[in-house]
Image (tube, grey):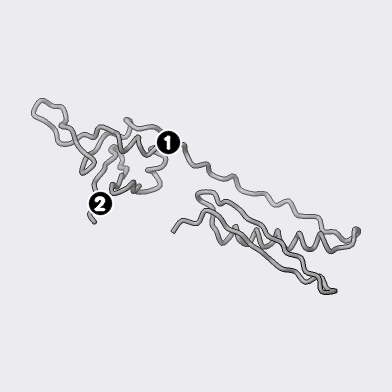
Amino acid sequence: MKIDRISVARKFNLGNYETLDVGVEAILGERENPLEAWKVLENMAELYLQSRTAKPSEKPVAEEKPTPPQEQAPEFDPQELLGHKWKGKRTGEGSYAEGSLGWGWDFRDKFSKDAIAVLEKGPLQVGEHEFTLGEVLVSVKKKKA
């Protein structure tokens, strides 16, 4: 399961039979922890209530917390891997036979920096194929069902 959005909704009792509904939603970055982001949203809802119900002289000043820079996901097109002409075994003439998505490999310098950045995070599964990055090679193999 991939969580890409979170939301928090709160109903606050204002007294005199009045309530206030506060809701906030966030779209998560690729490496953002949903539980930590959820806590931030809860604090935002609580802070909003405090600012809404406090007297003008008591209104809290939101603390400006430094947020760590979000790592941007590289612009990566899986077609670069799926459409690549993979190498197979070495032929007698010193070149390499054509490989396939069932089993193949190529040197890592034959791929874009973005593709390598994605593969550095670990094996990548695209459809029924798994792509892995080694010290020198990028490999592909068809996953067994």
What number of labels is visible?
2
In three-dimensional space, the C-alpha distance between marks 1 and 2, rounded to whole angstroms, equals: 23 Å
- The extreme right residue here reads 57
At 77% across and 55% down in the image, what residue appears? 62
Q: Residues within 10 Å of mark 2 (few under 14, many from 20)?
A: few
- Give coordinates of residue 92: x percent, y percent: 8, 29
Q: Name the residue under label 1.
A: 114
Q: Say which quarter of the image contains residue 136.
A: top left
**Where, quadrant-wise, is the C terminus in this rendering?**
bottom left
Q: Is mark 2 on a helix, strand or loop?
A: loop
Q: Say which quarter of the image contains residue 16.
A: bottom right
Q: Residues within 10 Å of mark 1 (few under 14, many from 20)?
A: some
- The extreme top residue here reads 93
From the viewer's perspective, is 65 left or right of 36? right
Q: Of circles 1 and 2, which is in front?
A: 2
- Give coordinates of residue 77: x percent, y percent: 40, 37
Task: Out of 32 and 65, give the one closest to the viewer.
Answer: 32
Q: Are marks 1 and 2 in contact (CB under 8 Å)?
A: no
Q: Is mark 1 on a helix, strand or loop?
A: helix
What amino acid type should be assigned to the residue bearing mark 1? Asp
From the viewer's perspective, is 92 left or right of 69? left
- The extreme left residue here reads 92
At 32% across and 35% down in the image, what residue appears? 108
- Give coordinates of residue 101: x percent, y percent: 24, 41
From the viewer's perspective, is 137 left or right of 67? left
At 50% across and 57% down in the image, what residue appears? 3
Q: Which mark is residue 143?
A: 2
- Give coordinates of residue 75: x percent, y percent: 46, 36
What amino acid type should be assigned to the residue bearing mark 2? Lys
**Where, quadrant-wise, is the N terminus in this rendering?**
bottom left
- Mark with earlier residue (1, 2): 1
- The answer to whether residue 6 is above or below residue 124 is below
